[in-house]
């Protein structure tokens, strides 16, 4: 019988350090708003020592100028009543987006933040359709590895629940060592097990967890005889029954 990822039902209400918003994490946060980045930019230019590093300012300037979208990035678009425009689309080599008929030409995504995607595409599609109902979601590519039912790479909306991303991979198996679950970035531990459990229990999103393209969610294999220890570790368990609408597996 499949085992879903379980977490403490009575998790603390404090936000794990990995999800707290600092100047550095704000710059990397997938759904950061332009106003937030501009406010940080102004503080850094004025010599605010709380975050006033030259490299941080350079990152803010770069993100505001070039935007968030790179060639190969995916966008989930849903236009009510139009099946041709309701699909996953890929950003082209020139950072532009080409949509099928009835749109024409390409839409440059240079300088566009993920948080601006909805408004950008709403305005663009409205040039070709009357009062369109548009929903656009930027996708982030995550690797979900180890003791899950379907390990692999998944493209997930930045505003999706972290728990739903795990459930897109089928949830954890009975052999998973939840005490050693973690999220890694470039081979380094980013979020340890306790914080990962807490983020899921609190219903935090991919964005709120400050995850980026390429981050890995890992569930190691438990040593033989550790199942009862896992149960004692997590205490009162609740199963995640999140919706996984819009979460798609990336095979390339």
Image (cartoon, rainbow, N blue to C red):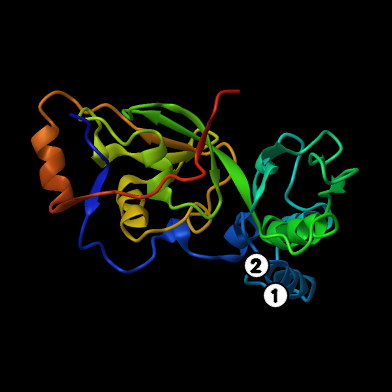
* Residue 50 visible in the shown view: yes
Name the residue at 22% across, 35% down.
3
SS for dot 2: loop
The 10 Å Cα crowd at callout 1, few under 14, some 14 to 19, many 20 or more, is: few
Find residue 117 and report its horizontal and vertical position in percent.
Answer: 71, 56
Left or right of residue 152, residue 27 in this image = right
Instruction: Tell which of 1 and 43 is nearer to you.
Output: 1
SS for dot 1: loop
Q: Which mark is drawn over residue 51?
A: 2
Name the residue at 48% across, 64% down.
20
Instruction: Tell which of 93 and 230 is nearer to you.
Output: 93
Instruction: Tell which of 100 and 218 is nearer to you.
Output: 100
Residue topped by disc 1: 48
Name the residue at 61% across, 65% down.
23
> Where 221 sits versus 66, above or below?
above
Quarter of the rendering containing residue 225:
top left
What distance separates the C-alpha of mark 1 from that of mark 2?
Answer: 6 Å
Find residue 127 and report its horizontal and vertical position in percent.
Answer: 85, 58
Name the residue at 39% across, 40% down.
166
Q: Which mark is drawn over residue 34?
A: none
Find residue 46 and report its horizontal and vertical position in percent.
Answer: 78, 76
Q: Quadrant of the N terminus?
A: top left
Quarter of the rendering containing residue 73:
top right
> Where 110 sits versus 25, above or below?
above
How many numbered discs, if any? 2
The 10 Å Cα crowd at callout 2, few under 14, some 14 to 19, many 20 or more, is: some
Left or right of residue 228, residue 60 in this image = right
* Residue 191 visible in the shown view: no
Left or right of residue 154, residue 86 in this image = right
- Marks 1,2: beta carbons within 8 A: yes
């Amino acid at each position: 019988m499949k085992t879903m990822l379980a977490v403490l039902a009575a998790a603390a209400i404090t936000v794990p350090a990995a999800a707290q918003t600092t100047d550095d994490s704000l710059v990397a946060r997938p759904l950061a708003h332009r106003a937030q980045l501009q406010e940080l930019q102004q503080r850094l230019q004025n010599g605010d020592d709380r975050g006033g590093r030259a490299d941080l300012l350079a990152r803010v300037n770069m993100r505001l100028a070039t935007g968030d979208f790179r060639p190969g990035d995916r966008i989930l678009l849903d236009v009510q009543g139009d099946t041709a425009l309701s699909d996953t689309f890929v950003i082209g080599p020139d950072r532009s987006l080409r949509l099928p008929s009835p749109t024409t030409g390409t839409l440059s995504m240079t300088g566009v933040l993920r948080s601006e995607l909805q408004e950008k595409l709403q305005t663009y599609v409205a040039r070709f359709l009357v009062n369109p109902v548009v929903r656009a979601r930027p996708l982030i590519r995550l690797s979900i590895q180890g003791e899950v039912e379907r390990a692999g790479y998944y493209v997930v909306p930045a505003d999706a629940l972290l728990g739903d991303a795990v459930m897109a991979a089928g949830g954890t198996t009975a052999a998973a060592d939840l005490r050693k679950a973690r999220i890694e970035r470039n081979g380094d531990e980013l979020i340890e097990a306790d914080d990962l459990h807490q983020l899921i229990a609190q219903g935090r999103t991919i964005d709120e967890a400050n995850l980026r393209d390429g981050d890995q969610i890992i569930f190691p294999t438990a040593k033989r005889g550790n199942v009862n220890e896992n149960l004692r570790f997590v205490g009162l368990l609740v199963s995640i029954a999140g919706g996984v609408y819009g979460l798609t597996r990336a095979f390339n």
